[in-house]
Image (cartoon, rainbow, N blue to C red):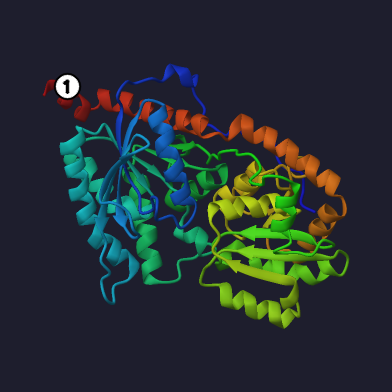
Amino acid sequence: MGGLHPPKPSPVVEGPELSCYNLPDMHVLHIAWEYPPHIVGGLGRHVAELLPALASQGVRPAVVTPRLRDGPETELTDGVAVRRVPAPPIPDADYPTFVAHVSDDLVQAARELQETYGRFDLVHAHDWLATEASVRLKYQWRVPLIATIHATERGRGRGGLHSDAARRINDLEWRLTYEAWRVIVCSHFMAGQIHDYFQTPLDKIDVVPNGVYISGSPFRDADHWLSFRRRYVADDERMVFHVGRIVYEKGLHVLLNAWPAVTARVRARLVIAGTGGYLEALKAQAAALGISDQVTFVGFVSDEERDQLYHAADLAIFPSLYEPFGIVALEALANGCPLIVSDAGGLAEVVQNGITGLVVRADNSGELADAITSALSRPDIARARAAAALREIREYYTWPRIAAATVQVYTRVIEAWRESEWGQEARRE
C-alpha cells in the first residue's frame, strides 16, 4: 500500500475571507472548447458547473465555444450567455492548426457578445485551445486575462513532447501562462507542474479545486437497486467499477494486469464504462490475460447511468498514470462509493489514504491488486471510509465554495487592473 497521505491542503485559494470580495455586476467572458452539450473530459465538466455557480454569486458569465455538437448558436441559460461558433473541419490540418483557424471566429463571437451584453471586465481562458483568442481580446479590449490550466501536454506525454503538434501545444500553454495576470490550477500538483514546465512564479498561481454536486440515491427502492445491479453482476459477485475516457494515461492496463490476482482471492467482476482510442488495446489485453469473461466494457453511459453504477458498485477504481485533479474521484465519493486511486497527480490530494479511500502507487499492479482485495474483503471498513469522504465533500468541494474562491481571484485581478495604466485609461474615458 502507498504511504500515508500528506496533511490536506486548503482546497481554496488563500487570502482574506471570501465575504470581503464582492464587486457588483462583474462581467466575465470565458473561452472554452468544451461546453454542454459538448463535454469530453474534466475541462468540460468544470466549465459547465462553474459558470452557473458564478452566476449565483452575482457574476455575469458568458462563454464562447466551438459548436462541435448540437446546440443553439446563441442562448441564455442558468444565467450564462452562450455563443457557439461553427467549427468546420480542415482537411489534412493537425489540431493546433484547426484551433488557430477557429480562433478567428471565437474572437468575432466575443465581440458580438460584448455588443449585446456590454463591456467585459475580464477574459477567462481555459487551456491552450483558448490561447490565441483570449490573448487577442486581452490587448484589443485592454482588460485582464485569467487562465485556468486543466492539464498540460507535457504531463499527458509523461514528461516528453513527442511530435511537432505537441511542441506547438506546449508553446501555447507557455504563452497563456505568460500572458495571464493570474493562473488558476485545480491542485497543488498542477501548480508544481506549471512552475516547473513554464517557470510561472508560484505567487502568480492560485489553487482552486474542482467541485461536485451531491445527489441522493438514483434508485426508488432496494428491488430497483437489485434489478439494476443484476444487469452487470451475479448476486454472489462483487462489482468493481471504472468510468472515464479510455486513454493510456488513465492506467486501465495496470488494472487489468492486477485483475487475475484479485479474482484468485475474491469472486468479482470489473465493469469499465467509457469510450476512447485505447479501448481495443484493452480488450486485446483482457483476452491475452484470460479474463475477458470477468471484464465488461459497457461503452458510453449517461450521467444518470454513471450514478446508478456508482451506487450499485462495491468499489470504484481510478489507477491513473497522469491526473491533474480527478473529477471522477469526487463523483464517486459524492455517490457514496468506496474508492481506490493511484497517487498520480491531484488524485492523492482528493483522497486521504486509509481515511476517505485507499491510495496506491501509480503503475503498480501488485499493490493495486492487494488494495482491491483488501477493500472487497472488508466492505464495512470500505463503506466507513466512503462515509467519511462524503462528509469532507459536503464541507470543501461544493460548487458555491469553488465559485466564491474563483470570484476572489477575479477581484484581486480587477483591483490590480484599476491601478494599472489600462485601468487608469479606462477611468478617464
> In the rendered view, does 139 fall on the left or right side of 408?
left
Which residue is rendered at x = 74% and y = 76% of the image? Answer: 293
- Of residues 323 and 386, which is closer to you in this image? 386
Q: Is residue 25 visible?
A: yes
Residue 326 in view, yes or no: no
Q: Nearer the viewer, residue 25 or 325?
A: 25
* Residue 95 sits above or below residue 380 on the image: below
Task: State the image coordinates of residue 63 (x, y, percent, origin top left).
Answer: 31, 44
Q: Residue furthest bottom?
A: 288
Looking at this view, is 374 or 188 the one in front? 374
- Side of 38 relative to 360 (left or right): left
Q: Residues within 10 Å of mark 1 (few under 14, many from 20)?
A: few
Give the residue at x 69% y 53%: 341
Q: Position of residue 120 (x, y in %)?
A: 24, 34
Quarter of the image containing the N terminus? bottom right
Q: Residue at x 23, y 62 (%)?
A: 101
Q: Quadrant of the C terminus?
A: top left
Q: Position of residue 300 (x, y in %)?
A: 54, 64
Q: Which residue is mark 1?
A: 427
Q: Amino acid at mark 1?
A: Arg
Residue at far top of view: 20
